[in-house]
Amino acid sequence: MDHSNHMDDMISSSAMDHSMPGMDHGDMDMCSMNMIFTWDWKNTCIIYKWWHVRSLNDFILSFIAIVLLGMGYELAKFWFTKWEKRHINIILGATSNSSSSVMTQYKLKRSLFYGFQVGYSFMLMLVFMTYNGWYMLAVVIGAAIGNHIWGSLAEPTESSLACH
């Protein structure tokens, strides 16, 4: 018995129409979403859709901005450490009557600064998660320059939730 004609009844994937009506993107440049390491910078969106790198000028400005963000993180760490050290001396010198109020204010401000620092570090982590070597390098360069400028002035701090 010949069964060769039975395959004609099955739907072949080559005969299927895979087009998606209403999804014609034409020449529109879209953000590329890489899940593997790449050095390709064109059409990369950094953290937000509006931070879309389309041209070489966009790339250069974005690279510089990320370096500055990395430096800013190190400045924020330095400033926080300096603020904390100054306020610990104030708390130690406070009288017992006012120490409860002073301590509460200190802890509230310290928590807010810490939350800012963690949020900032997570944003830098998201830059890293573009998997783009150029932007990863920009974060590292910014952190290195910032640490060179401000890190040597601060005392070593304990580790935190900061991703960087």
Image (spheres, rainbow, N blue to C red):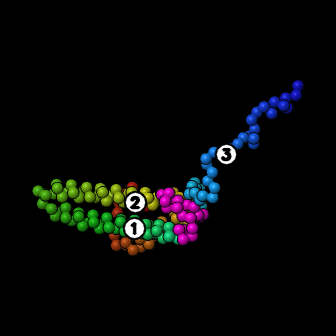
* Quarter of the picture holding the N terminus: top right
Q: Mark 2 points at which residue?
A: 120
Where 64 sits versus 115, above or below?
below
Where 37 sits versus 21, above or below?
below
> What is the chief secondary structure element of the magenta stretch?
loop
Q: Residue at x 64, y 45 (%)?
A: 20
Query: Which of the 4 image quarters holds residue 112?
Result: bottom left
Is residue 140 visible in the rendered image? The answer is: no
Q: Do the residues labelled 1 and 2 touch (CB within 8 Å)?
A: yes
Residue 26 screen position, x and y as percent:
63, 55
The alpha-carbon separation of the residues under discs 3 and 2 comes to 42 Å
Nearer-N-terminus badge (3/2): 3
Residue most extreme to the front? 22
Using the image as rendered, state which of residue 3 and residue 163 is in the foreground. 3
Q: Find numbered disc 1 in the image and state the secondary structure of the residue it sits on.
A: helix
* Magenta residue span: 39-59
Amino acid type of the residue that numbered disc 2 sits on in the rendered structure: Tyr
Q: Residue at x 15, y 62 (%)?
A: 94
Q: Mark 3 points at which residue?
A: 19
Tell whether 80 sits left or right of 139: left
Using the image as rendered, state which of residue 23 and residue 38 is in the foreground. 23
Query: Which of the 4 image quarters holds residue 115?
Result: bottom left
Residue 12 screen position, x and y as percent:
75, 38
Residue 127 screen position, x and y as percent:
49, 60
Amino acid type of the residue that numbered disc 1 sits on in the rendered structure: Gly
Q: Mark 1 points at which residue?
A: 72
Is residue 31 visible in the rendered image? The answer is: yes
Nearest to the eye among marks 3 and 2: give it: 3
